Amino acid sequence: MIPWLAPGMEFPPVVQALDSPNGLLAATAVVTAPRLIEAYRQGIFPWYSEGEPVLWWSPDPRMVLFTDELRVSRSLRKRARAIASEPATAICLDRDFVGAMQACAEPRSDHPGTWITDDIIDSYAELHRHGLAHSIELWSHDACIGGLYGVAMGRMFYGESMFSRERDASKIALVALVRLLRNERVPVIDCQQKTAHLASLGAREIKRSEFCAMVAEAVQAPSIDWSRYADRNLNELLTE
């Protein structure tokens, strides 16, 4: 059994999460921006299907990408540099945050459903308005061809979802994000759960206790000044 949290009730300690399914901690009736902030500060995230209660997770081990461990293949590096030199192509921060979320919610051939419901989009959009959620988008000829979004607190970034409408577009957005975060001395991106795709890019699993200790320290650090990257073409991040 997992606890059902009424409004105002705090999350239980993450060590109380179930072993099977790995990391299931609690459930709520709705998702809200304040509840998301509370969750991320403790290494907890929501993941559920439409029509289900909101399920909250903190798995052990936890998949993370240390920003100095990003693995960029020779072919991806070559493609990223080609993209960076293309005048009609631009890497942008938050040009269309909600649009990036909606693109991540689109059905995929290997996963026709989505957990990115309208309520999720509304809640993360509220975080975005408060400077706590951001997207990196790859634009070509005024069309968004790939990107990702996540939550930022202090010197911690929690990756949420990625999308590609052209080959390697989401990977190129990730390369740009990692290089931005390196510049800002952010050591790690939370990837939540293990996938072969993330592992191929250098992500690996660590113990939940280690992850939560990192989060507790990182969220207390001064926040990134994201305004430095707004309304700019960030293609130079791909040429480093």
Image (cartoon, rainbow, N blue to C red):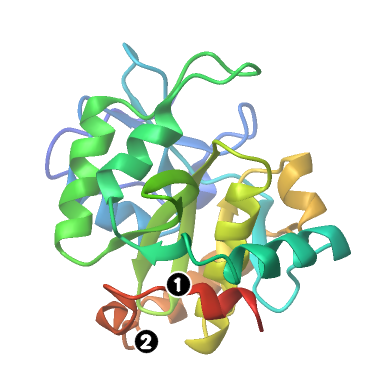
Residue drawn at (27%, 72%), measured in percent from left and top?
231
Residue drawn at (66%, 18%), measured in percent from left and top?
110
Residue furthest toward the right?
A: 74
Q: The residue under label 2 is which amino acid type?
A: Ala
Residue 71 shows in the view: no
Residue furthest toward the front?
A: 87
Q: Position of residue 95 (x, y in %)?
A: 29, 58
- Would residue 15 appear left or right of 76 to someone viewing this image? left
Q: CA distance from mark 2 to mark 1?
A: 9 Å
Considering depth in this image, is 40 or 171 the residue closer to the camera? 171
Quarter of the rendering occupied by the N terminus: top left
Q: Position of residue 146 (x, y in %)?
A: 51, 46
- Please tell me the numbered disc located at residue 221: 2
Question: Looking at the image, do the residues carrying marks 2 and 1 touch, with CB atoms under 8 Å apart?
Answer: yes
Place residue 165 in its image quadrant. Answer: top right
Secondary structure of the residue carrying numbered label 1: strand
- Please say if 145 is above or below 73: above
Residue 232 shows in the view: yes
Residue where numbered disc 1 is placed: 156
- Would residue 211 appear left or right of 29 to someone viewing this image? right
Mark positioned earlier in the residue sequence (2 or 1):
1
